[in-house]
Every structure is written in structure tokens, then in C-alpha cells.
Image (cartoon, grey):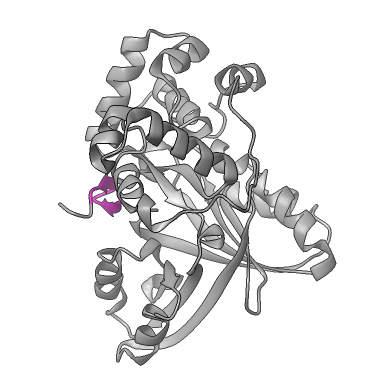
């Protein structure tokens, strides 16, 4: 199915404001509300995009996020990746390094090491390293990586985000066990109506709207798009492992997060202290990015580039035949 500039601009608008009303998106990109609604539903049902909410594990009591690098025996990585993808505690699973290495993000609950203990003992695992996510850098890159070159201009961004409350970073607002039903509903559909969320949680529409607003403003949760990369012109994906001088880490992370080529950047533990996910149209675009924008950042001592050949799972949804699919199917 071909996708044109209007589809790409709708995707970019959703990246910037995942729960924005279709009427506002339509006004920004210059089409009718019905066109936006129809095209979004078509892209959603055909496996191009799903909107969801995610918890920031660094802000969630008793939870931590880890990026895992798993080297496997020849011929076994795909099977292990598929098994990992079916778990509720995993995300961002890819096969890279010639198909022998799995990159996976895992959520670890306090007092339950889970995959951190299980994977090193697996017979088909040859090498294993675990890197705790210490800080996620938030910038323009997370919202601008879809269809680079066809994104909304500054005026469109401003109009779309008008009235959006700024993040408070309130440390007292955190996810609680009582939010489990709300988060399950938002993981399935990040654009679910207040009425649907109220029905899922047993609360009122006012209560769920206020709770989502508070959690979002505090940074305890954030909204995200799982997108079928190749369908929107992204054909080269790579994990970048940076070694950055400690006195430059915060500055470098903030600058990297603003790069439109990066969908994710975080400070991590281990030999490399910052990990990022690059999304580019092709290998040439990745090369230009590394030799220009990355090369300009002070404090970068080295960067390991690991191409991700096959995406198995996004933040929540599986990737099957190049399309976003529900893991429960």
C-alpha cells in the first residue's frame, strides 16, 4: 500500500501530539477532519502505526529498564527473539550483527531479576551484557524521525502543540498499582477515548482524564508510536553505542535527543555510557549523520554502530511481515 505526503504528515503530527484531536491535526496539515480520521484508521488496521502509552521505568517505584545484548549460537537467534517478543517485560527487539546478536530492552521488577538471570544460563546464549538505563534523554528526535524531509514546519508544530501543558517533572507523581488497568488500556490504544478508559478502569471520565494529565505532565508516562519503518521510508536502523567523556554526557545526550535521525537516546551503565537508536532512509544517510552531526558533538570518544537487520518487536507491538501486529493475535 503506497503512502503519500499526507499520510506522512499525519504520522508526524501524531508523533508530536499522539492524542491530539483529528480536527486539530486536520487544520494543521490542511485537509478535512474526515480525511485524517479515515487515513489514520486505515494505517492502524493495515499495521502501519499504533499509538500507545509507556511508563518511564526510571520514574516507577520498584522497576528499572535494561538494554540487553545477546550473542547467540548460529541459527538460534531468530527463535530466541520470537520467544522474547511474546513476553510482557520486553520491547525493542531486533536481530543485528549478521543475525547472531539480539538487542532487547527489558523491564526488571525489584527483587525479580527475571531475564537478567535466565538468559545467561540459556544453552544457545554465547555472550550476554546488560546495561541499565539511567536517564532517557527527551528531545525533538523522538517526535521527528518519521518520514524525514516531510515533517511539519515550525508553524505547524506550534499550532499543533498550542495549549499543551509543559512537563512539571513532579517527583511525587508516580505510577501506582492502581494505575495497572489504565496503563493496560493505553498500551492497547493510546488514543482510546475517555469513555473507553473510564469503562476499562471503573472510574469516571473526569478521573481518568485528570490522572493521565498528571502522569504525563510529571513524565511518569509518555505516549509513543509503534511504526512499520519500511512502510514510511525508513530502511536503515542501527543501535549506536557511545563512549562519552563524563563531563560532556548530559550535554551530548541532550544534543543527540534533538537529532531527527534518532528515535531514542539514553544514558546507560557499562563500557559505553550512552545508547541511541538511529532511523535513516538508507546507509548513505546514516553515514552522513555519523560524519556530520555526531562528529560535531564535544566529548564523543567513540561510537560503535550495530545495524539492526530485522525488527521483531517495537515498544509493545510485534513486527510481522513488515507490519505492526498485536502480540495477543
Q: What residue do we see at 24% from left, 73% from top?
A: 79
Judge by depth and name the residue closer to the eye, 136 or 265: 136
Percent coordinates x, y for residue 93 in the rendering: 38, 63
Eyeballing the image, is 205 above or below 47?
above
Furthest toward the left, the residue is 329
Percent coordinates x, y for residue 270 in the rendering: 63, 78
Q: What residue do we see at 45% from left, 24% from top?
A: 20
Percent coordinates x, y for residue 89 in the rendering: 35, 66
Q: Which quadrant of the structure image shows residue 8?
A: top left
Q: Which residues are magenta?
A: 316-326
Percent coordinates x, y for residue 235 in the rendering: 44, 47
73 vs 111, left or right, is left
Q: What residue do we see at 34% from left, 42% from top?
A: 186
Q: What residue do we see at 43% from left, 29% from top?
A: 19
Eyeballing the image, is 22 above or below 196?
above
Eyeballing the image, is 119 above or below 5?
below
Q: Which quadrant of the structure image shows residue 209?
A: top left
134 vs 23, left or right, is right
Amino acid at each position: 500500500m503506497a503512502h503519500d505526503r499526507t499520510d506522512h504528515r499525519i504520522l508526524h503530527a501524531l508523533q508530536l501530539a499522539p492524542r491530539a484531536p483529528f480536527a486539530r491535526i486536520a487544520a494543521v496539515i490542511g485537509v478535512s477532519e474526515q480525511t485524517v480520521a479515515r487515513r489514520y484508521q486505515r494505517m492502524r488496521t493495515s499495521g502501519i502505526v499504533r499509538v500507545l502509552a509507556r511508563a518511564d521505568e526510571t520514574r516507577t517505584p520498584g522497576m528499572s529498564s535494561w538494554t540487553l545484548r545477546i550473542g547467540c549460537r548460529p541459527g538460534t537467534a531468530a527463535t530466541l527473539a520470537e520467544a522474547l517478543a511474546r513476553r510482557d517485560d520486553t520491547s525493542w527487539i531486533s536481530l543485528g550483527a549478521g543475525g547472531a546478536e539480539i538487542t532487547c530492552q527489558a523491564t526488571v521488577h525489584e527483587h525479580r531479576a527475571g531475564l537478567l538471570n535466565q538468559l545467561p544460563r540459556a544453552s544457545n546464549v554465547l555472550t550476554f551484557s546488560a546495561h541499565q538505563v539511567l536517564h532517557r534523554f527527551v528531545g525533538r528526535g523522538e517526535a521527528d524521525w518519521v518520514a524525514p524531509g516531510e515533517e511539519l514546519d515550525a508553524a505547524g508544530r506550534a499550532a499543533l502543540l498550542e495549549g499543551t501543558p509543559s512537563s512539571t517533572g513532579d517527583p511525587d507523581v508516580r505510577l501506582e498499582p492502581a494505575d495497572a488497568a489504565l496503563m493496560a488500556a493505553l498500551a492497547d490504544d493510546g488514543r482510546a477515548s475517555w469513555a473507553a478508559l473510564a469503562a476499562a478502569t471503573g472510574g469516571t471520565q473526569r478521573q481518568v482524564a485528570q490522572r493521565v494529565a498528571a502522569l504525563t505532565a510529571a513524565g511518569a508516562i509518555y505516549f509513543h508510536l509503534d511504526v512499520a519503518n519500511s512502510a514510511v521510508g525508513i530502511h536503515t536502523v542501527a543501535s549506536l553505542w557511545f563512549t562519552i567523556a563524563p563531563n560532556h554526557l548530559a550535554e551530548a545526550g541532550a544534543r543527540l535527543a534533538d537529532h531527527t535521525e534518532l528515535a531514542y537516546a539514553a544514558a546507560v551503565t557499562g563500557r559505553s555510557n550512552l545508547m541511541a537508536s538511529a532511523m535513516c532512509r538508507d546507509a548513505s544517510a546514516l553515514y552522513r549523520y555519523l560524519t556530520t552531526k555526531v562528529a560535531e558533538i564535544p566529548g564523543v570518544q567513540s561510537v560503535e554502530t550495530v545495524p539492526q537487520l530485522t525488527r521483531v518487536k517495537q515498544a509493545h507491538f510485534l513486527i510481522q511481515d513488515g507490519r505492526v501486529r498485536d502480540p495477543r493475535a
